[in-house]
Image (tube, rainbow, N blue to C red):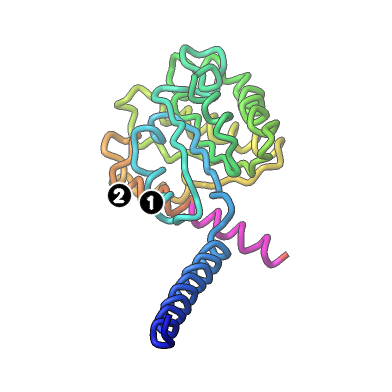
Amino acid sequence: MNSKKRLLILGLLILVVSSLLTVLTMQAVEDRNRPATKIRVACVGDSITQGSEYPNDLWMLLGSNYTLGNFGVNGTTVSIDSAKPYIKETAFKSAQKFQPNIVIIMLGSNDAHPDDEQYNGSFVANYIKLVNGFQGLASKPAIWIVKPPPIFNNGTGISTKFFDMSIIPNIEEAANKLHLPVIDVYATLADHPEYFGDGVHPTLKGSEAIAGVIFDALVSSKSQNTAD
């Protein structure tokens, strides 16, 4: 083999090795910047969760480092003795199997229906039992209690008065007993009936608003923890 061929082969080898090193370096940087696992967020709730865009809007705000599961079920309640308690739904078990790092619970609106008012006495205990079902997970999730948006009319059969006077205070009591943070969607959206087409379920604008309130609370908490 003459010297020109040897130099040509040597040059090609150097080029290949150089290209390979460049690719490996770029991959190492990308892997270093990418989280080992995405943060799993479980959105637990009723039709305000299942039937709205709020979970997707929240996912967009949180970004690619997160993965979000919508575990809402239409018509469900906190009260275990009602016709459709959330804790007895398949979605509850699915949310547990998801092994979330963060759980966002927004339930209670359907508990203000006249048919379910009779179970109000056990609401707080039932809420605590629901939360305990997530606190025992191996993922040890951070749990957030959300006060649902206001009921602006009772065209859906839900009692606005009972919701305001009983359900909201009960949610606060459960959160206090559990020492868990509360996200106050109820008060934040109190002056925005236009965000709810039927007075209960959010429009696209309402979904964005709910997602924004929850996102702000999560970011604020993360900032505080970082500062500490």
Q: Residue at x 54, y 69 (%)?
A: 29
Q: Please indicate whether residue 196 sits to the left or right of residue 107 in the image.
A: left
Which amino acid does the dot numbered 1 rest on?
A: Ala
Label 2 – label 1 distance at C-alpha: 6 Å
The residue lying at 52 percent from left, 32 percent from top is 165
Taking the spot 58% from the left edge, 29% from the top edge, the residue there is 96
Of 89 and 157, which appears nearest the observer?
89
Which residue lies under the disc numbered 2?
205
Question: What kind of residue is marked 2?
Answer: Lys
Magenta-colored span: 215-227
**Whole-percent x and y of residue 14?**
47, 79
Instruction: Kindly give the residue lying farthest to the bottom in the view shown.
Output: 3
The residue to which callout 1 is attached is 209
Q: Is residue 137 left or right of residue 65?
A: right
Q: Is residue 35 left or right of residue 204?
A: right
Magenta-drawn stretch contains 113: no
Instruction: Give coordinates of residue 180: x percent, y percent.
Output: 66, 42
Q: Please identify the dominant SS of the magenta region.
A: helix
Q: Which mark is residue 137?
A: none
Q: Which residue corresponds to the image point at 31% horizontal and 41% vertical from the top-left?
A: 196
